[in-house]
C-alpha cells in the first residue's frame, strides 16, 4: 500500500508529491496527459516571489515592470513600477521541472494515467486508474486531489461545492505590438465582460493574449473580436495565432478541502486569486500546507477527517485572508458599470493614486494596492462601498 497517491502533475500536485517523496514516503504522481505541462492552460505570468517560494529559478522570457490599462470609452492608463513586478515564464517548463523534482526525490511519476474514481476501505483508499494497458487499482493511505478546476477527486469525495467558474481563451501570437516589459490589460463589457483580457509580450514581436469571461458569455467570441475591435486590435493588426490556449478558472476556496483519507490542493481546493485568476503561487502554498498535515497523519497512522482538519486552518492562515479580500474586490468590480470603470481609470491616473499603485501593486496580494489606492483617494469608495468591507 502506498503512503500517498497524488492525482494531477500540475504545480500543486507535483509540489505535494515532491515534498512527500523527499520526506521518505512512498508516493505516486498520476497525470492523465502523456507530456507533463501539455496542453498549456496558462498565460505564464508569475511574481518573482513564486520562484523564491519554489526554492529555485527557471529561465524567464520577460520581466514586467509596467502595465497599460485599456478601458471603456477610450479610457487609458499606463503604469511604470520602480522594480520588476512579474515574470513571464514557460509554464509547461515549470510544470515539468516540479514533476522532475518529485521524480528525483523518489516519487513514481505516472504520465498517461487517468484517475477514474475511488472507494474507501477499512485500511485506506482503493483508487481506480486507467493506463495504457487498461484499468487497475492502487491502494493508498492518502489520496491527494491536485486535479485542477474540474477535480474528480473533490467530486468523488463529496467535496464539490458551488463556486464561480470562469472560462478562459487565449493564444500565443506573432506580430504582437505591445511594449517590452509591459502587460496590457483590457476591461469593459465590450472587450471582456465580468473579468479582463490580457496581452503579454513574450519576446520580440511575440505575445500571449487572452481573456476570461463568465458563462454564458463565451471567451472565444470576445477573443475573435480582439483582432478587429477596440484597444486589442490596435496591438494585433496582422498578428498571427501560433498556438491556442483555453481552460477554466474556479474562484472560491473549498471548505472543507479535506475528508477521510483525502486532501485537495491548488485549483481543486479553489486557490486561484479572484482578482487576477492566478493560481500558481497560492497552489504551491496549499501544497506545502497539505504536506505538513499529511506528514502528521502518516506519522500517527490516523487519516480520518478530524486528523486532517488542521489543513483548513493552515490554508486560512497562509493565503485564505488574501483570497477572501480578493472575493470582496471581485464583488465590487462586478457591481461597476462601464461608465464607472472609465471614471475610475481616470481617477487612478491622478499622480498620488498612480504612485500608490506603482509602489504597492502586487499580483499575489492585490488587496495591498487596493488599500493604498483607497487611502490615496477616498472618493473612490463612492463607486463601490463594498470595497471597504475587507478593510474594516
Ligand atoms: C487561460 C489561463 C491563464 C492562466 N494564467 C495564469 C497566470 O498567468 N499565472 C497564474 O499564476 N495562474 C494562471 N492561471 C491559473 C493557473 O493555471 C492555475 O491556477 C494552476 O494551473 C493551478 O495549478 P494546479 O496544480 O492546482 O492545477 P493544474 O495546473 O490544472 O493541474 C491539474 C493537473 O491534473 C491533471 N488531471 C486532471 N484530472 C485528472 C485525472 N482524472 N487523472 C489524472 N490527472 C488529471 C491535469 O491534466 C493537470 O495536469 C491561468 C489559467 C487559465 C485557464
Image (spheres, rainbow, N blue to C red):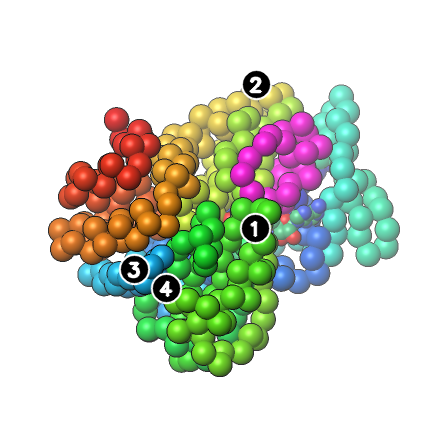
Q: Earlier in the sequence, mark 4 or mark 3?
A: 3
Q: Secondary structure at mark 4?
A: strand
Badge 4 density bin: few <14, some 14–19, many ≥20, Cα 10 Å: many
Point out the tag, 3 or 2, that comes first from the N-terminus.
3
| 167 w.r.t. 209: above or below | above
Query: Mark number for residue 344?
Result: none
Q: Which residue is mark 1?
A: 217
Residue underneath mark 2? 306
Pinpoint residue 105: horizontal percent, then vertical percent. Answer: 57, 51
Q: Are marks 3 and 1 in contact (CB under 8 Å)?
A: no
User: Are the residues tagged 2 and 1 within 8 Å (C-beta)?
Assistant: no
Q: From the viewer's perspective, is the residue at label 2 or at label 4 nearer? A: 4
Q: Can you identify the residue that label 4 sits on?
A: 184
Residue 138 falls in which quadrant of the image? Answer: top right
Q: Which residue is mark 3?
A: 75
* Chain-order first, disc 2 or disc 4: 4
Q: Position of residue 276 (x, y in %)?
A: 41, 49
The relative height of residue 243 versus residue 322 in the rendered view (above or below) is below
Residue 126 as seen in the image, left or right of residue 158: right
Q: Secondary structure at mark 2?
A: helix
Classify 10 Å Cα crowding around label 3: few (below 14), some (14-19), many (20 and above): some
The residue furthest right is 134
3D distance between C-alphas at marks 4 and 1:
22 Å
The residue lying at 44 percent from left, 52 percent from top is 189
Residue 39 visible in this rendered orientation of the protein? yes
The C terminus sits in image quarter: top left
Tell me if label 4 and label 1 are in contact, CB under 8 Å: no
Amino acid at each position: 500500500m502506498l503512503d500517498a497517491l497524488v492525482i494531477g502533475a500540475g504545480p500543486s500536485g507535483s509540489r505535494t508529491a515532491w515534498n512527500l517523496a523527499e520526506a521518505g514516503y512512498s508516493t505516486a504522481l498520476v497525470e492523465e496527459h502523456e507530456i507533463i505541462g501539455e496542453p498549456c492552460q496558462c498565460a505564464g505570468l508569475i511574481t518573482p516571489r513564486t520562484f523564491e517560494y519554489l526554492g529555485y529559478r527557471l529561465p524567464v522570457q520577460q520581466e514586467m515592470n509596467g502595465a497599460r490599462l485599456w478601458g471603456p470609452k477610450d479610457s487609458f492608463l499606463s503604469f511604470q513600477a520602480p522594480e520588476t513586478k512579474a515574470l513571464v515564464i514557460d509554464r509547461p517548463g515549470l510544470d515539468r521541472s516540479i514533476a522532475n523534482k518529485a521524480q528525483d526525490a523518489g516519487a513514481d511519476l505516472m504520465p498517461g494515467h487517468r484517475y477514474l474514481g475511488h472507494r474507501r476501505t477499512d485500511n485506506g483508499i482503493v483508487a481506480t486508474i486507467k493506463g495504457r494497458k487498461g484499468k487497475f487499482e492502487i491502494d493508498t493511505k492518502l489520496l491527494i486531489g491536485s486535479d485542477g478546476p474540474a477535480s474528480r477527486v473533490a467530486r468523488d469525495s463529496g467535496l464539490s461545492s458551488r463556486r464561480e467558474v470562469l472560462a478562459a481563451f487565449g493564444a500565443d501570437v506573432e506580430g504582437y505590438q505591445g511594449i517590452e516589459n509591459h502587460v496590457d490589460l483590457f476591461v469593459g463589457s465590450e472587450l471582456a465582460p465580468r473579468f479582463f483580457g490580457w496581452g503579454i509580450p513574450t519576446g520580440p514581436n511575440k505575445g500571449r493574449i487572452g481573456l476570461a469571461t463568465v458563462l454564458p458569455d463565451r471567451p472565444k467570441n470576445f477573443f475573435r473580436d480582439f483582432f478587429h475591435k477596440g484597444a486589442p486590435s490596435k496591438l494585433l493588426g496582422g498578428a498571427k495565432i501560433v498556438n491556442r490556449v483555453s481552460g477554466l478558472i474556479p474562484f472560491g476556496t473549498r471548505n472543507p478541502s479535506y475528508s477521510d483519507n483525502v486532501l485537495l490542493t491548488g485549483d481543486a481546493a479553489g486557490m486561484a486569486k479572484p482578482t487576477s485568476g492566478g493560481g500558481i503561487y497560492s497552489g504551491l502554498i496549499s501544497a506545502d500546507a497539505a504536506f505538513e498535515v499529511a506528514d502528521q497523519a502518516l506519522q500517527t497512522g490516523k487519516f480520518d477527517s478530524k486528523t486532517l482538519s488542521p489543513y483548513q486552518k493552515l490554508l486560512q492562515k497562509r493565503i485564505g485572508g488574501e483570497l477572501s479580500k480578493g472575493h470582496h474586490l471581485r464583488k465590487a468590480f462586478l457591481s461597476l458599470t462601464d461608465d464607472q470603470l472609465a471614471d475610475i481609470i481616470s481617477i487612478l491616473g491622478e499622480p498620488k493614486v498612480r504612485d500608490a499603485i506603482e509602489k504597492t501593486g502586487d499580483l499575489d496580494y492585490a488587496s495591498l494596492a487596493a488599500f493604498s489606492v483607497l487611502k490615496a483617494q477616498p472618493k473612490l469608495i463612492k463607486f463601490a462601498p463594498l470595497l471597504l468591507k475587507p478593510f474594516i
